[in-house]
């Protein structure tokens, strides 16, 4: 059934992650009259536009226009667009419905949904859960905040499908339904350039279980206080796991009665997913690690500790910094002083904050020698400098702890530039 046939649908924010392309494909197949508006230019959006070049879509790029938000039947808000947008207020004043692709998917999905959110670990956990469920339910699907709009795979879903959905706080903000199984991996301060406070950020995350009933399931991280204390607010059955992404996926698999042998098989073969503590090259016995999705101080601390535990005698050269999200870098500064030999800072407001916090670490809080700090203007310079500093056995770790938009298209573009620069040294 084509629910949106001949409806005028405006997609606000095409983006470069792939989700916007999936939304456009869905509404095209539905027979909607489709328009896409984005503040980015045609040149900036070229990879996404290439995928839509054969579709009859009207584009307004490099700006938004008031009239496009006054006469549409439906506005689809890219989750990256703030709810407070001036143009969305115009739409609401004109009684035009504003939704995200996630909102519509929850309304139309005939199957139960396993939703995963968290500040860190949601992509890895969602991928692992999907791989585990596929062993028992071969028609399982994975979508959401991994570059695949769930609307694009809606036609593959029936009542027996297991739907694994990675959900960001942006996607959860206005959601009025919750998945039947909800997993929260970790909660740390993040996106405080979008939310007024950590409390408001957590409120957005709570939608993942807010509308559950007593038959539903909530899975929480026992080792993360911010997630653990949410159990008192749940109407659903609460289960706890200890610490790791693997533990969260394992518990979910057990609840779905996946046989132990199949669980062991999946876990033994799983090597992680790209852009998360990913060793991408070893040159002259120096390991180069891509952890571009570490966009909070806590994520960087975790990466540093992980590699220090694996290789206790080796030096870490950390490439970090970028654009600040109103986060606190005090603990990261202490970790850097104690565990990082050389710090290379990319341009941005977060880098300035990191430098300031480093200067305020007290000598008695430092148990090792001096950390040298270098400022660079580009990723090419960062990789070149790190390769000059690195000795055999050292680790060059890209783990920024900040947003990427001042220098790169997004965090994945940041990773691509890192990898390209490594190839040239």
Image (tube, rainbow, N blue to C red):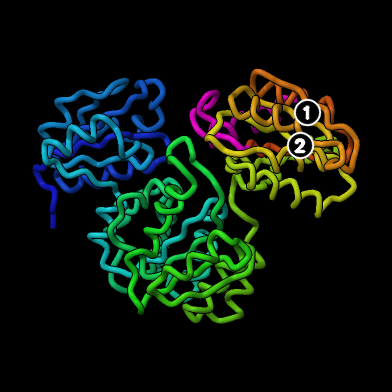
Q: Is residue 322 above or below residue 260?
A: above
Q: What range is drawn magenta here?
A: 401-425
Q: Between residues 263 and 190, which one lies in front from this camera angle?
A: 190
Task: First in sequence, mark 1 or 2: give its number.
Answer: 1
Q: Nearer the viewer, residue 418 or 206?
A: 206
Within-10-Å neighbours for mark 2: few <14, some 14–19, many 20+: many
Picture coordinates of residue 417 (x, y %)?
A: 60, 28
Front residue of 118/366: it is 366
- State the residue at coordinates (33%, 74%): 213
- Give the SS element for disc 1: helix
Quadrant including the C terminus: top right
Q: Nearer the viewer, residue 163 or 349?
A: 349
Residue at the spot 64% in from the left edge and 29% down from the top edge: 353
Q: Position of residue 341 (x, y in %)?
A: 84, 35
Quick check: 224 above or below 392? below
Inspect the magenta stretch and tell me whether residue 101 lies in it.
no
Q: Is residue 423 magenta?
A: yes
Residue under label 2: 396
Q: Is residue 144 left or right of residue 362?
A: left
Residue count near mark 1 (Cα–Cα under 10 Å), binned few <14, some 14–19, many ≥20: many
| x and y, in percent, of residue 320 in the image | 67, 33
Point 74% across, 35% down: residue: 318
Q: Is residue 141 left or right of residue 221?
A: left
C-beta proximity under 8 Å, tags 1 and 2: yes
Quarter containing the N terminus: bottom left
Q: Which residue is mark 1?
A: 386
Secondary structure at badge 2 equals: strand
Vertical arrangement, residue 361 with respect to residue 266, above or below: above
Q: Identify the residue at horizontal 14%, vertical 41% (top origin).
A: 96
Q: Answer yes or no: is residue 214 visible.
A: yes
């Amino acid at each position: 059934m084509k629910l949106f046939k001949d409806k005028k649908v405006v997609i606000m924010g095409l983006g470069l992650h792939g989700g916007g392309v999936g939304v456009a494909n869905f509404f095209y197949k539905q027979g909607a009259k489709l328009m896409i508006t984005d503040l980015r230019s045609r040149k900036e959006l070229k990879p996404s536009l290439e995928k839509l070049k054969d579709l009859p879509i009207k584009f307004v790029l490099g700006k938004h226009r008031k009239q496009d938000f006054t006469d549409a039947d439906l506005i689809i808000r890219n989750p990256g667009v703030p709810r407070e947008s001036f143009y969305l207020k115009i739409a609401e004043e004109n009684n035009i419905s504003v939704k995200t692709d996630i909102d519509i998917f929850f309304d139309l999905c005939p199957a139960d949904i396993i939703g995963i959110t968290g500040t860190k670990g949601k992509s890895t956990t969602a991928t692992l859960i999907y791989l585990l469920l596929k062993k028992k339910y071969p028609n399982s699907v994975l979508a959401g905040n991994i570059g695949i709009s769930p609307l694009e795979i809606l036609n593959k879903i029936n009542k027996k499908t297991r739907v694994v959905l990675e959900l960001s706080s942006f996607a959860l903000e206005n959601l009025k339904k919750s998945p039947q199984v909800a997993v929260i991996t970790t909660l740390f301060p993040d996106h405080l350039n979008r939310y007024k406070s950590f409390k408001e950020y957590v409120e957005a995350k709570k939608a993942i279980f807010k509308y559950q009933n007593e038959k539903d399931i909530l899975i929480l991280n026992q080792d993360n206080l911010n997630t653990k204390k949410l159990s008192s607010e749940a109407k659903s059955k609460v289960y706890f796991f200890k610490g790791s992404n693997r533990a969260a996926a394992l518990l979910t698999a057990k609840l779905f009665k996946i046989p132990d042998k199949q669980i062991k098989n999946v876990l033994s073969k799983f090597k992680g997913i790209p852009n998360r503590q990913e060793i991408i090259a070893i040159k002259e016995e120096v390991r180069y690690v891509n952890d571009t999705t570490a966009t909070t101080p806590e994520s960087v601390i975790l990466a540093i500790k992980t590699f220090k535990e694996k290789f206790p005698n080796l030096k870490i050269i950390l490439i970090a910094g970028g654009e600040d999200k109103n986060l606190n870098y005090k603990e990261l500064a202490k970790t850097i002083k104690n565990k990082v030999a050389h710090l290379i800072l990319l341009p941005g407001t977060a880098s300035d904050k990191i430098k300031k916090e480093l200067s305020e670490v007290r000598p008695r809080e430092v148990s090792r020698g001096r950390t040298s700090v270098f400022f660079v203007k580009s990723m090419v310079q960062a990789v070149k400098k790190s390769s000059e500093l690195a000795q055999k056995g050292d680790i060059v770790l890209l783990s920024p702890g900040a947003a990427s938009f001042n220098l790169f298209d997004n965090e994945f573009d940041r990773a691509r530039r890192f990898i390209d620069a490594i190839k040239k040294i």
